[in-house]
Image (spheres, rainbow, N blue to C red):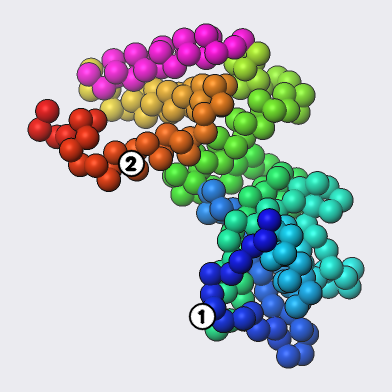
Amino acid sequence: MTASSTSAAPLRFDSTTGLAPAIVQDADTGQVLMLGYVNDEAWAKTQQEGRVTFFSRSKNRLWTKGESSGNYLTVVSLHIDCDADTVLIRALPAGPTCHRGTISCFEQAEQVIAPAPPIGFLAALERLIAERKQFPERAPTSYTVSLFQKGIPKIAQKVGEEAVESVIDAVAGHRDTLPGEVADLLYHLLVLLAATGVPMEEVIAVLQERHRLPNNRHLTETE
């Protein structure tokens, strides 16, 4: 992969240090993952290889994030700021970004999913569910892992049960318990999507396409 910058202006490096700050953001969730520094060589390598490479001030050499842990940061897009002296890198992390094992360098060690905007949190949750499916040995006692082990029929049954409970609470006007029931429904829907190999991105794409077609029967308010 060869990444390209969204700015026509070349990135400028500090005249004293030869470095420019690089902010890395999760392309799915919008969460800020870390701050590093790039020199001219690291910047070129990042663009050419599509993996984030920094200049490590402590190691005094180029450092590709994940070179020892395998937790690479795959570049989605590069955005140079208005002064052309800082770059925002939108990337997809292959695992925890921080050396402490957390998703972001800006979160507490005990957090599994850091606070994020609502849609970003769903993306982070979807990623965690996918990880549970792919690597069940990492969390053998996880409820999510147990669902995958039981298979699609059981997961689908749970979706149906949570949907019914959500409908009952909505019809009965149980405002206090409805959020919890809908949360259960959304979670089990994400597990079902993961089990069937359908990413949430495809579902959102369908919604976006329907939104562009106002006469679509799914969105027609006059029916």
List the residue tagged with mark 2.
209
Q: Position of residue 59 (x, y in %)?
A: 89, 68
Q: Which residue is under mark 1?
A: 82
Question: Helix or strand or loop: what does disc 1 sit on?
Answer: loop
Q: Is residue 138 magenta?
A: no
Mark 1 crowd level (few <14, some 14–19, many ≥20, 10 Å Cα): few
Give the residue furthest to the left: 222
Q: Is residue 69 above or below residue 18?
A: above
Q: Amino acid at mark 2?
A: Glu
Q: Please indicate, yes or no, whether residue 58 appears anywhere in the rendered image.
A: no
Rendering quarter of residue 184: top left
Residue type of the residue flagged with mark 1: Cys
In this rendering, does residue 71 appear at all?
A: yes
**Does 92 sit above or below residue 44?**
above
Seen in the picture, residue 117 relative to 112 is either above or below; the reply is below
What are the residue bounds of the magenta stretch? 150-171
Looking at the image, residue 42 lies above or below residue 32: below
The residue under the point 78% across, 85% down is 17
Quadrant of the drawing holding the C terminus: top left
Residue extending farthest bottom: 15
In percent of width and height, residue 204 lies at 41, 39
